[in-house]
Amino acid sequence: LVSVFSSKDVLMDNTSHSSSVTLGSQVRRILRHPVLILVSVVVFALAGAAYGYMTNGKYTAKASLVVYPMVVDPAGTGSANSAKVDIATESRVASSREVATQAAKTLISEGDTLSEAQLTSRLMNSVKVTGTSQTSVLDIEVTRSNPDDAARYANAMANSYLQVRSDADSATKQLDEQIAAAEGDANRNALVSQLQERRAQIQLTSLVGGRVMSQAQVPSSSNSLGPVKLGIVGAVAGL
């Protein structure tokens, strides 16, 4: 029995010694090639610095807003108390071309020199809308190389989204068309009265789609670590 245990101990010692020798020999083998180590460090450092340079100077500004339930037809069955906000749907609406186009028009009226099509494309490519789960809060983020543009664009998108969502003109215009078509027909006086009452209710009902909780501020620092820091990280990784 003693002989068996002794054999096992010897076997374990030999295995441990073999592993340590193998690890040590690998380390010594690497250290024998300092040029290879230097090349690896330089390559990884340059890759990190290049990535930092390409992503450097990107600034993100964020506007946050709360979305209110909407009453499309106060005379119908829905109500502001029973309606719910589908935050996922509203996120898609806030990043839509319709909102971006409205924001582009606003920016142009404020002095932006780009065309409406160019601004719309730029806004859609740089905006990110995130809805907070189980809430009615939307975060509209815009990332640009110019920090002032990032803040201006984010605020324009937020305000344009609320404007598009709160636009009651379409509802009243539809009712006006129905009233005009029914007027003059004695048999439809009751319908005209009903439509006029519904129109008055829509005008008296608050159709505010939400409000901006916090305006986007001009960011003071970029999102990237920068070429120097990423170059250092790459050099460490190259070791």
Image (cartoon, grey):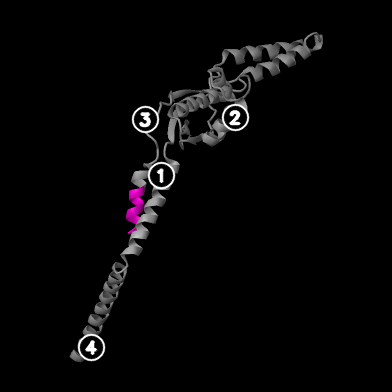
Is residue 54 toward the left or the right of residue 122 in the image? left
Q: Which residue is mark 1?
A: 52
Q: Position of residue 5 (x, y in %)?
A: 21, 86
The nearer-to-camera label among 4 and 2 is 2
Q: Which residue is mark 2?
A: 118
Residue 95 in view here = no
Residue drawn where x is 81% and y is 10% of the image: 185
- Which three-letter amino acid code belongs to the residue tagged 3? Ser
Residue 56 in view here = yes
Q: Are marks 1 and 3 in contact (CB under 8 Å)?
A: no
Q: Nearer the viewer, residue 198 or 175?
A: 175
Is residue 37 toward the left or the right of residue 208 in the image? left
Q: Are marks 3 and 2 in contact (CB under 8 Å)?
A: no
Which image quadrant: the C terminus?
A: bottom left
Q: Which residue is mark 4?
A: 7
The nearer-to-camera label among 1 and 3 is 1
Whole-angstrom CA distance, mark 4 to mark 2, is 80 Å
Q: Position of residue 91 (x, y in %)?
A: 53, 34
- Which three-letter amino acid code belongs to the residue tagged 4? Ser
Span of residues in magenta = 231-239
Which image quadrant: the N terminus?
A: bottom left
| Label 4 SS | helix
Q: Which residue is mark 3?
A: 220
Q: Nearer the viewer, residue 173 or 44?
A: 44
Whole-angstrom CA distance, mark 1 to mark 3, is 18 Å
| Label 1 SS | helix
Whole-angstrom CA distance, mark 3 to mark 4, is 69 Å
Residue drawn where x is 34% and y is 44% of the image: 228
